Image (cartoon, grey):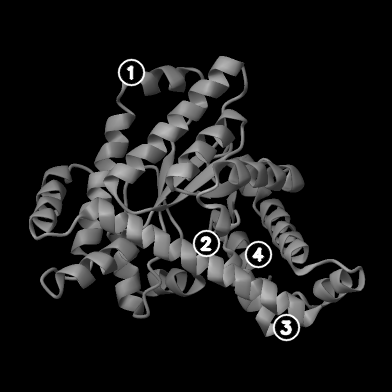
Amino acid sequence: MDGSLKRRVAEGQVSGAVLPLRELGREVRAGTVYREQIEGLGARGVGAEVALRTLHRHDVRWACDLLAARFASTQGEDGWVCAELDPRLADDAAGSLAEARALAGAVNLPNLLVTVPGTAAGMEVVSGCVAEGIGVNVSHLYSPRRYESAVDAYFEGLERALAAGRSMVRCSVASFGTARMDAALSERQGAVVPPGRSALALARAVYHLYEERLGTSGWRRLRSAGARPQRLLWPDAAEADRTVAARRVEDLVAWNTVQTMSARTLDAVAQHGRLRGDTLSGEAAGAREHLSEVRIGGVGIEELAVEVAATELRERAEDRAAVVGSLWERR
């Protein structure tokens, strides 16, 4: 990894990190940052799969150490590092849970969040991880119903931890991909809806669900036992246009939410961003009306969300295979 993350943490620009394998793959193919590590692993006869896990875990530990001060100063509110599991295991609950345990044990630092895809099997993994005290980032959520499943899995894990007398996890986030779903809806609807409108409606609908669940008696009981809310996270939209990228960030602001941004987006917000306060609270009625119109127009949001998640996970698996191939070539 280069020094940009270290600099941005020192300057207070970022309060956490996401370490996708596709970024590691770019560095491996560039042949600079990991050259000595790869040569050393190759000299020891380490296979490409094991080498990939070794490099990834090294980066995760490095980032966790880098953000440890932020983690400590905020009492665990910030300073988290998200590390993904093998995407090929997205529909394998037992395999994913075993890998999550292995990753948490190998990193062995308190500010790790294991990224778990929000598939049906993934929800079992989320519940299992939380029950065992492993923090999670539930990823690939693209519909309100799937988000509710992620909340249910988190609550279930907390209940299991409480029943077993274990300490509650200090953090969980639910990553809701508004931008990717907005693009998929626009493609299905043609040019009928302006870009970004469905993304904002989805975010407002999901944030309303978030607020509703924090008002339940079940949550109040968990909260009194020491549980913390599962924060909503909005992934980076990866917009090529810097002004559009900044506007995407401006549109998704509310209490206790998180946004991930690439270095490019972060710089765009610093240059063009004009935050205008909370954009999500109290907007559920308009959001529901827009999403109802989408459904009336013949687009099944839940079905499309499943397709989008499956496509993204397939792309992640292909990225991983490419990284493994690059490692074989460079050993």
- CB under 8 Å between discs 1 and 4: no
Neighbour tally class for label 1: few under 14, some 14-19, many 20 plus, Cα within 10 Å: few
| 109 sits to left or right of 140 | right
| 271 sits to left or right of 194 | right
In the picture, the disc for residue 217 is 1
The residue under label 2 is: 13
Quote the CA–CA distance across marks 4 and 2.
10 Å
Q: Residue at x 48, y 31 (%)?
A: 228
Mark 2 secondary-structure assignment: loop
Identified by mark 4, the residue type is Lys
Q: Residue at x 64, y 41 (%)?
A: 72
Neighbour tally class for label 4: few under 14, some 14-19, many 20 plus, Cα within 10 Å: some
In the picture, the disc for residue 6 is 4
Neighbour tally class for label 2: few under 14, some 14-19, many 20 plus, Cα within 10 Å: few
Quote the CA–CA distance across marks 3 and 4.
21 Å
Q: Residue at x 76, y 47 (%)?
A: 106
Which mark is in front, 2 or 3?
Answer: 3
- CB under 8 Å between discs 2 and 1: no
The residue under label 3 is: 31
